[in-house]
Every structure is written in C-alpha cells, then in structure tokens.
Image (cartoon, rainbow, N blue to C red):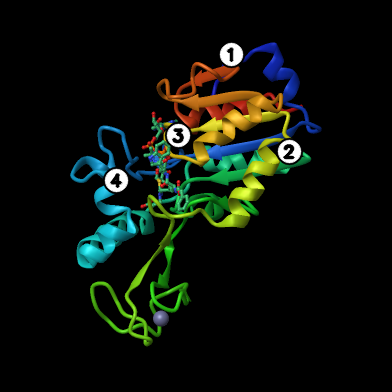
Amino acid sequence: MNEKITISDSLRSLLSKKTKVVVLTGAGISAESGVPTFRGKDGLWKKFRPEELATFDAFMANPKLVWEWYEYRRKIIEEIEPNQGHLALVDFQNYFDKFNLITQNVDGLHHKAGSKNVVELHGNIRRNKCIRCGKIYESLEGTIEGTPPRCPCGGNIRPDVVWFGEMLPQDAINHAFAVSSECNLFFSIGTSAVVHPAASLPLIAKRAGAYVVEVNISPTEITHLVDESLFGKAGEILPSLVKFFK
Ligand code: BV8
Ligand code: ZN
C-alpha cells in the first residue's frame, strides 16, 4: 500500500526543500519491524509497569531481573530490520535542507536505516556502562561475566539508556529544545506523547509557530492540539508523504 494519502494544502505547501523540519519518533515507528511498543496491547510493559523495570532503583533492587529484561529486548532487536517508515525518514533527511531527527527509541533502527546525526534522547540499548566508574561499553568485551556482568572496577554493568527519574543527556535534550523552537514543520510519529520531557517537544514547536503533524494509528495525548493528524501506520504514511516532495 503506497498510494497517495490525503493531506491538507497547508502541509502540501510545507513539503518543500526550504522548510525546516524536525521529526520526533517513539516506539510506534519500530512496531512494524517487530519491536513491541511500551503501552500497546502487545506492550513490553504487559507483565511489569515501567516504574518496576526501567528505573535505577529497580536495577539496584533486582539487577538480575532488569538485566535479563534488557537482554530479552536486545535479542528481539538483533533480529530485526528497519521498516519503510525508518527508510522514508532517510528520504526526508536527503530532501529537506534543514532536517533534525530526534528519537525516544533505544533500538538504533534509525541509524541502521541510514539516518545521520540521530538525536537519541533516551540512550541506546546496545550500549552499556558501569554504574560505579561510568565507563561506557560498546560491547561486553573486558567485563567480568555475570547477570549483570561486572566492570573490572567492581561496579555492575547497566544498559546505557535513560531510566525514569534520570536526566536525559544534556546535549541531546538541549539540541532537541533548540531545533523544535526554530522549525516550520514538526512531525510527532509513533509516540503516545506521555513521557516527558520528550512529550513537550511538539508543544514547544507549536508555540514557536510550527505546523505540527502527528502520524499515529490512534489518537494520543496531543491529538487535540496538533494541526493535522495522519492516522495510519508510519510504515505506510511516511513513504506516501515522500511522493509529495517536489
Ligand atoms: C525525567 C528508555 C527528571 C528506557 C524510556 C508526571 C508528569 C510529567 C512527567 C512525569 C510525571 N511523573 C514522572 C515524570 C517524569 C517521567 C515521565 O514522563 N513519566 C511519564 C510516564 C508520566 N520522565 C522521566 O522520568 C524522564 N526523566 O523526567 O527526569 C529529572 C529532573 C531532575 C533530576 C532528575 C530527573 C526520563 C524518561 C525516559 C524514560 N525512558 N526509555 C527503556 O527503553 O527501557 S521511556 C520509553 O517510553 C521509551 O523511550 C519510549 O520511546 C518512551 C515513550 O513511549 P512511546 O515511544 O510513546 O511508546 P508507547 O508504547 O507509549 O506509544 C507507542 C505509540 O505508537 C502509540 O501511540 C501507538 O498508537 C503508536 N503506534 C503503534 N504502532 C504504530 C504506531 N504509530 C504509527 N505506526 C505504527 N505502526
Ligand atoms: Zn567500572
């Protein structure tokens, strides 16, 4: 399915190279690749609530359970490929003179699809770090085997992702705030827009006068305030939007 979708004249006129575009993605853009979303019916949280696993306290209380949950997610991610939605965003990046891709996802699929300078607000599940000395590990080489593995300094190794209650990487969120407040066109794609501060980016763009478009299979927390909602799968909607590029 790649036929043309119906978009407004306003959006159509904004799909020109000169428009400054920011895209925010969430778990929904990876759904068609087979990555379970967080809050959907097949959501990752079906057995546990976010606060039970994706927090530092949860890791300190039960490092084995939290580590195994991430290992389970890494296994899913190792076997999957970017989908048409990720690939369309590479076309977006090649078309628009000013384009910024910001993601809440930790699966690395935008990078794998060929997107450049991806801003990962919540880190990357493939990377790890030591909770004691902060050493970053791109692979587990050099760590002491265990569940979780240990750093030679004695500290536990944890996934290099941002947990609830943790600050986002300062440069990432500052860059995201800056470009969202200067763009003409902002896309919120495949996110329920409940997790802050990422969820404030569409509002910042809207307040700065950008035209805000949501791409989602169902309404979200921000549907009432965006300028245009394109309901459907990101893997179908985004390639259809590419057809409007002049
Ligand atoms: C912080 C990494 C402060 C880990 C993640 C009350 C009000 C406001 C804020 C808070 C509050 N209480 C607590 C907070 C803060 C909290 C927060 O926002 N909580 C929420 C739940 C209320 N935020 C934080 O803690 C952040 N840090 O605030 O620090 C601070 C200040 C001072 C000092 C210290 C700290 C940190 C948040 C980051 C958490 N980490 N991930 C991991 O992955 O394990 S969040 C996690 O949720 C993922 O990153 C995910 O991307 C993100 C957001 O979820 P979505 O991506 O939107 O996924 P979801 O499943 O919800 O939705 C999927 C959507 O896709 C749906 O809408 C669905 O319809 C759609 N969809 C499905 N299929 C498709 C599709 N769309 C299109 N096509 C399809 N095919
Ligand atoms: Zn260490």
Sequence order check: which comes first, mark 2 or mark 4? 4
Task: Find numbered disc 1 in the image and state the secondary structure of the residue it sits on.
Answer: loop
Q: Residue at x 47, y 72 (%)?
A: 138
Q: On residue 95, which mark appears?
A: 2
Q: Which residue is mark 3?
A: 191
Disc 4 residue lies near ligand 1 with CB under 8 A: yes
Residue 215 falls left or right of residue 57: right
In the image, the residue with mark 2 has its CB under 8 Å from the nearest atom of ligand 1 = no
Q: Which of the two marks, 3 or 1, is nearer to us in this view?
A: 3
Q: CA distance from mark 3 to mark 2?
A: 24 Å
Instruction: Identify the element where label 4 is drawn.
Output: helix
State how far apart marks 2 and 1 are (Cα): 20 Å
Residue 223, above or below 135: above
The outermost residue toward the right is 18
Residue at label 1? 6
Residue with the mark numbered 4: 50
Along the line of sight, the residue nearer the viewer: 74 or 114: 74
Q: Nearer the viewer, mark 3 or mark 2?
A: 3
Q: Position of residue 12 (x, y in %)?
A: 70, 18
Using the numbered discs, state the Cα–Cα distance from disc 4 to disc 1 in whole angstroms. 36 Å
